[in-house]
Structure formats: structure tokens, C-alpha cells
Image: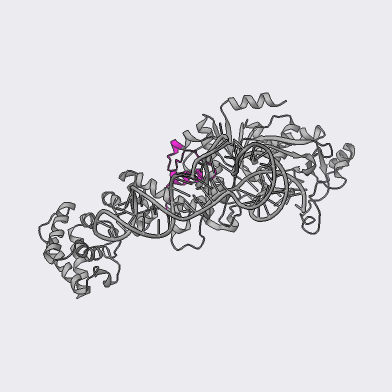
Amino acid sequence: MTKISSGMSATLAPRVRFAPSPTGFLHVGSARTFIFNWLYARHNGGTMILRLDDTDVERNTEESVESIFEGLRWLNLGWDEEYKQSERIELHRKMAWTILEKGLAYRDFTPAHAGDAEKSGGQGTWLCSPGARELSREESDRRARAGEPFALRFRVPRGTGQVVRFSDAVYGEQAKEADDIEDFALLRSDGMPTYHLASCADDVDLRISHIIRGQDHLTNTFKHVLILEAAGYAPPQFAHLPLLVAPDGTKLSKRRHGPVVSVTTYRDAGFLPGAFINFLCLLGWSPKNDRENMSLRELQDAFSLEGINRSNAVVNFKEPAATAEEMFDPKAVWLNAEQIRGLRVEDLSTRLLPIVRAAGYDVSVEKMLQITPLIRERIKLLRDVLTAADFFFVKELPPYDPAELIPQKGDAGMALKVLIKAREVLGANVEFEHDALDHALRAAAQELGLKAGQMFQPIRVAVCGRKNAPPLFEMLAVLGKETSLERIEKAISQLA
RNA sequence: GGCGCUAUCGUCUAACGGUUAGGACAUCGCCCUCUCAAGGCGGUAAUACGGGUUCGAUUCCCGUUAGCGCUACCA
């Protein structure tokens, strides 16, 4: 009976929505749901709708709304229409009364039951409050008029052998016996709509064609189908996404897993939004052709509901982590490093500069532009710039162990000899540029009868304070003659 | 407890019923090399278990086990 209209909506430009409830920060699972909806809309020339599902006044917070927008803004994908459920309550109630009028809902005057019965010994599921369902309409109306509070419940067609069905784009044909569904609430006793009602009423009103959401809603969908049919509407196309789970196997939650599940944590650690999006897309979806590092445009072109799989995906992270990098899923970090390397120097430099300045270093645009190519292949997260290039930013090097100056198979004497020679060579008329420095320093090594590595290491440590660093000549060129010589001088005095 | 969903290397995944079960990350080794990276090459590593169906099951069916989800006047 509903085949025709749902078939039609599938051929029209799709309308999809992301509907977070503002009860905490935007977490990675929600972000992925947003991204999949967005990708589906953009791939099919449809409309992306953002709807704040804020009917739970008790738990909603303004900070949460702000935090969700903050996360979405960083993703930088945008949306076409925006709604707030709390401003649409009348619409929801209207649908509730329609269902009541049809006799498909009833008033339940029993006080809210506090989910205690099922824990202790209670067999099976709670299905309805005894007596409430059988109350006559006259009696029900009378008590309501008298001002007695009630919740409005859906009258699930139990005992009729009816089976509720829908077809999921990801999980296939779904069926559940009405006997196994409890009389869920539509309206709370304070008159506020429940999630199920509000969601269905809004989806109808906003003409949502495809509901793409987490699999935790799969079993709720039977209730939604019931509501929609009772109100006289054809259900949209459903597509449920496999859940993102923590390394411990449980659904990601802010409560259990902390800030690592917050989108802003990734942002603050120095992920590129594109890499983060890319990573999330690969969780529960595959382009089926072994492509992994993809641009937003490529993701958009390749995206389809058919590519979504059915099993939960683990997001790896370590909560107490030694370094920021260890905290995140290695694949996410790799993708980020990969995309950083793919950035043009100017683009990367522009992203790096604010981070460097926020850390208190006064660095010019020009200087940053010189430094960037030296660290582009050495950083995985944008914030790594602070540890990878710190010696470029400071006037004086922080203290380091002079023993580091000693080269392989050498001793302090050799280090000293090298540095004195370096002071001489670099202090002379050599141009501070790669090739010239290369020639001069290699010649010096030969003169001293040393291997190139033995020559370079003391100089490297002297100018940057550590063994692992960008290539020496490039580094000296950026540091400049004055700073380089100052630091070599200091190293010499430390060895003497 | 009831109902539902899921099950391929450590992780993310690929494989119209016929493949030496492929790729990526991670890991290990080698090469390149002024260190560190990056890059190149190679290695280790998987179809949860038991029954069917079939000439032939990772693939289809049933069962077991395990995990997850839902079971609120939360969403």
C-alpha cells in the first residue's frame, strides 16, 4: 500500500537529516553519521538537514549545543536547512492526537515506572501498565478532563499475530512480531513528546526520504514504522549504520571513554578535518577497490549505501597515552600524516603558524614558510610542529646532554675537533645554502679524516640540541649563519 | 531474562559458490641514507565452532558460542 509513494521519494532528490540530541559534546560516532548523511545527500544532489533533537529538557544543555556546532564547524561540510525540535512541539502533539483519535493510542494514568521490576527476577519485558490499555474512552476522557496527569501510549497490536516489517538499505528485510513490542510512550505526562513521536512527526513534516542513523536505532525502527502507519504516512527508506565501538568492544560513550571520543579532541591534537573524515568513512564503509587515502570529492563520488557493511567497527585509542600520537587510532594518524604530506607548503604553513603562535613563539610568515618543508614529512599531527621544529623558534636552545655531541665510534675529543673545524668553515665565506654547505662540510670531513656522519652529527646536535632532526644543510640554511655559529660556540664551550 | 543484529589477519576491510583468501594500518626484517623521517622491497598474521545443501562452501541454510544493541514518561 505504501510502495508507490516510497518508490517515488527514492527517485526524487533525497532529503536526509542529522539529528543529534544536545546532551554532550559531538562524538566521533555522531560525526560519522553526519558525514554519511552529508555524503549521501551530496552524491545524490539532495538536501542535508540539521535538526537538534532537544525534547529532553532535563538533559539538554546550551554548552552541548555549542560543542556540537563547534565540532560540525570544524568538519566544515555544512548543511542546507536547520531546525530545532523544541520549537515544533505543536506539530508533534498534533500527530499524537491524530493517533489517539484513531484509537491507536491510549492514556496511561499510572505514574512513571522506574525500571526496577525487570532487574529483579522479573521475567520478560514490560509490555504495558495493567488496566490502562483497557480503560474505556469515556473514562479516559473524563479523567483527563479532571486534570489527572497521564502519558500517551501507543496501542501496539499485540495478540493479533501481526508482524511489523521494513526494509533496511544496510541490514535488509527486518521483521518483528508486534507481540514483542511494548506499548511505548508518545507523550510524557508533562505533555512533552518523546523521541519516537517527535522524530517521526518531524521526519514526515520535513519530508525526509532517507533516515541514515546508528544501528542502535534498528529495533526502535519497528516503533517508528508503527507510528508512521498509524498516522497515515509511508515510512521513508531506512539505512542503519554499524556502530563504532571502543577497543573494549562497547559502544563509544563519553561517560566511559572520555575526551578521546570527542571530535574537538581530534581537532585540538592537530588532525586535518579531511583526514578525520576520511578515517571515519573507512569505518563501516568501503569503496571496494582498495582505495584508502581519499579526498572529500573522491569520497563523495564513491559513496553509496551499498558500500556500508553490517558489523561494528573498533576505533582504537589508548586512554593513558604517552604521546598525543599514541592516543589515537594508528590508521587515523597515518591518514593524517599522509594528507599533511600531500598539502602544498603554503597551505601547510598557514595551518601550522597559528599553532606555533598560540604556543607563544613569535614567528614570521616567511620563516614559517622556510621551516615547513623541513618538517612536512616528519610530523603526523599538526601539533607535532611544536616538538619537531621548536629549535627554529627559540633564540637559545634549551639545555641538552653534551654527550649527545659525540659521534658514532668517536669521543669527546673528536666532537670538539669537528666543532672547531665547523666553526672555522662556517665562519668563513661559505654561502648558507644547501649545495655550498654540502661541499664545504664534506671537504672538511675529508680533511679531518672522518666519515661524513661523524662530521655531521656533532654539528647537528650543536645547532638543534638533539640527534633526530631534519637534514643538516637545510637546517643550517634556515637557521642562518649567526645562530648556527652561536650554537656551535656554545657546544664547544660545553665540551671544553 | 525477552527481542534484534553481527561474526575474514591484532585493527579497518576485499573476495556474482570455484582465488596460492587480496589490500591498508600496525608489527618485524632488508635497501636507500649525514641522524630522524619519507620512500622502495620482503616477512609474520584471518574465514569462531559444529552440522547440513552442493561436484565444490569465507560465501547459502540450521544449531552452538561469543560480542553488541534495544528492552524508560533518554535519545
What is the quadrant of residue B28 in the picture? Answer: bottom left
Relative placement, left or right, of A159 versus A316 is: right
Foreground: A173 or A272? A173
Relative placement, left or right, of B29 versus A141 is: left
Please report the residue visible at 27 percent of the width from the left and 62 percent of the height from the top.
A464
What is the quadrant of residue A178 in the picture? Answer: top right
**Number of numbered labels in the structure image:** 0
Q: Position of residue A60 (x, y in %)?
A: 63, 49
Q: Position of residue A430 (x, y in %)?
A: 12, 56
Foreground: A28 or B65? B65
**Which color scheme is applied?**
one colour
Q: Is residue A263 visible?
A: yes
Relative placement, left or right, of B27 versus A190 is: left
Please report the residue visible at 68 percent of the width from the left and 32 percent of the height from the top.
A235
Of all residues, the one furthest to the left in this rendering is A429
Quadrant (top left/top right/bottom left/bottom right) for the N terminus of chain A: top right
Foreground: A139 or A470? A470
Residue A223 is one of the magenta-drawn residues: no
Please report the residue visible at 58 percent of the width from the left and 55 percent of the height from the top.
A254
Residue A294 is one of the magenta-drawn residues: yes
* Position of A343 relative to A206 (above/below): below
Q: Position of residue A227 (x, y in %)?
A: 73, 36
What residue range appears in magenta?
A270-298
Q: Is residue A361 visible?
A: no
Quadrant (top left/top right/bottom left/bottom right) for the C terminus of chain A: bottom left
Foreground: B58 or A312? B58
Q: Position of residue A161 (x, y in %)?
A: 82, 37
What is the quadrant of residue A100 in the picture? Answer: top right
* Position of A494 relative to A110 (above/below): below
